[in-house]
Image: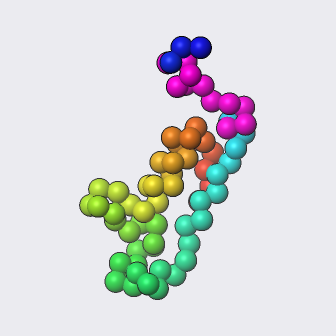
Amino acid sequence: MTETESARYVSRLTKDTLALVLAGGRGSRLKQLTQWRAKPAVPFGGKFRIIDFPLSNCVNSGIRKVGI
């Protein structure tokens, strides 16, 4: 298997995997940031939102089915 083929290879187990991202909570410790928006929507670094990190990890792991 070439390097390109191995980069595109997704196992059968990965194809059948469903990731569940828990994105709830009151955000009471982040009150100033979560007063007007949900905790997963809080900006991080001016470019990303908190929810982007677990979603990116799923995509980079080959998991395409994600529930939030």
On screen, residue 6 above or below 51: above
Residue 25 shows in this picture: yes
- Which residue sits at x=68%, y=36%? 15
On screen, residue 23 above or below 56: below
**What predominant SS class does the magenta segment belong to?**
helix
Total of numbered circles in the picture?
0
Q: Is residue 7 magenta?
A: yes
- Which residue sits at x=44%, y=55%? 52
Rendered-image quadrant of the C terminus: bottom right
**Can you tell which quarter of the image residue 34 is in?**
bottom left
Rendered-image quadrant of the N terminus: top right
Residue 36 shows in this picture: no
Farthest-out residue, left:
46
Tell which of 2 and 53 is nearer to you: 2
- Which residue sits at x=55%, y=67%? 23
Residue 51, position as x, y percentages in the image: 46, 60
Q: Is residue 43 left or right of residue 7?
A: left
Residue 25, position as x, y percentages in the image: 55, 77
**Magenta segment, which residues?**
4-14
- Which residue sits at x=42%, y=66%? 41
On screen, residue 25 above or below 44: below
Residue 50, position as x, y percentages in the image: 42, 63
Residue 28, position as x, y percentages in the image: 46, 85
Tell which of 3 and 15 is nearer to you: 3
Q: Is residue 17 magenta?
A: no
Scheme of image coloration = rainbow
